[in-house]
Image (cartoon, rainbow, N blue to C red):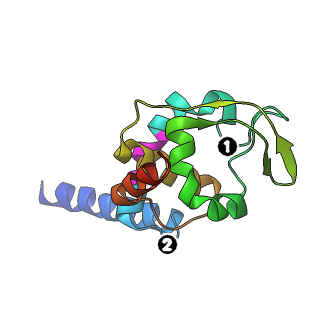
Amino acid sequence: MKGYCLLILAVLILAIQFLFSCSGNLSVETMQYATNGQKLYRTHCQNCHGAKGEGLGRLYPPLTDANFLNAHRSDLACIVKYGMSGEIEVSGVTYNENMPGVPELTPIDIAYVLTYITTYFGDSETHFTQQEIEKQLTDCQ
C-alpha cells in the first residue's frame, strides 16, 4: 500500500510540473483566473469571437492581437460589460458591427474572462484584478 501511495504522489508531482512547464511564466493565480474565464468566454464570447479568439471574417474582430489588447487594456472591462458600437481597427482591419455588452457579469467575472483572453490569445503573463476591473467600470460610466 505504501508503494502505491508513493506512486500516486510521484504521478501528481509530475502532473503539476507538466502544468507549470506548459504555462510558461503564468502564476497559479493567473492560471486560476484564466481557467474560470474560459468557461465564461465559451458562454458569452465564443459564438462571435471563435473558440481560439480568431474572430469571424470582417464581422467580428479577433482577440489575438496582443498589441491591441495591451493598448486598450484600460477599456476592455467597459467593452465587455457595456458593449460598443462604431469603428474599431484590429490587426489592420476595420470592424463596424455593434457588440452587445454582458451586463450580468460581475467585476470578478470580467477579470476572469479578460485574463483568459489576454493570456491565451494575447500572450500576457498577468491577470486582471477585481480592483482593476472595478476602477475601469467606474471610469466608463
Per the rendered image, the range of residues in magenta is 33-38
The picture places residue 120, in percent across and down from the top left corner, at 58, 54
Q: Is residue 78 magenta?
A: no
Q: Is residue 50 visible?
A: no
Question: Which residue of the protein is positioned furthest toward the front in this rendering?
Answer: 141
The picture places residue 140, in percent across and down from the top left corner, at 50, 49
Q: Earlier in the sequence, mark 1 or mark 2?
A: 2
Query: Which is more toward the observer, 78 or 125?
Result: 78
**Residue at (44% x, 59% y) in the render:** 128
Is residue 3 toward the left or the right of residue 47 in the image? left
**Residue at (87% x, 54% y) in the render:** 92
Q: Secondary structure at mark 2?
A: loop
| Residue 15 placement: quadrant | bottom left
Badge 1 density bin: few <14, some 14–19, many ≥20, Cα 10 Å? many
Name the residue carrying label 2.
25
Name the residue carrying label 1.
53
